[in-house]
Image (cartoon, grey):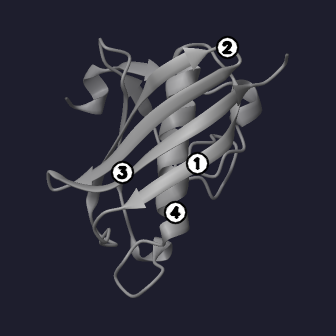
Amino acid sequence: MPINLLKPVKAVSSHAGCLLCGAQNPLSMRLQFGADENQVVHAEFKANDMLQGYQGIVHGGVICALLDSAMTHCLFNHSIEAVTGELKVKFILPVPCHANLQLRAWVEKATNPLYLLKADLTGDGRLLASAEAKFMRTGL
């Protein structure tokens, strides 16, 4: 489903400087997230050479950050502000630097203040990377 048809997910104000989505960060990738009717959060992103690790391949750390950002926004969609406590990423296929990418994230289990989320990164209909993370609610 195109991102413009989804319910926009807004980050909390303390997230304005985020490298991936922050409106107040001049280096931000300006990712925009939307939630579908099942509360799954989605984003679309065009990779580029500035994100490269090995020639022509997106850096693994960038892939981790993209997946983490999707899961963080999934929690924002549930009005939860939390920090990543553990992140496990599976790199399935190389992510080309000029790929059109789709991110998706959802809550797998919620036991306040701990949340288990999953996310995936796809391109051209193929699963490129996936993640599972534990988040801890802040402000307790």
Compute the Cα span from label 3 to label 2: 31 Å
Q: Which mark is residue 128?
A: none
Residue 14 in which image quadrant: top right
Q: Which mark is residue 62?
A: 4
Residue hosting label 3: 45
Compute the Cα span from label 1 to label 2: 18 Å
Compute the Cα span from label 1 to label 3: 21 Å
Q: Amino acid at mark 2?
A: Asn
The quarter in which the N terminus is drawn is top left
Q: Nearer the viewer, mark 1 or mark 3?
A: 1
Question: Which of pointers 1 and 3 lies earlier in the amino acid sequence?
Answer: 3
Q: Secondary structure at mark 3?
A: strand
| Percent position of residue 16, x then y | 70, 37
Compute the Cα span from label 4 to label 3: 12 Å
Question: Which of pointers 1 and 4 lies earlier in the amino acid sequence?
Answer: 4
Residue hosting label 1: 87
Residue 10 in which image quadrant: top right
Q: Which mark is residue 112?
A: 2
Q: Secondary structure at mark 4?
A: helix
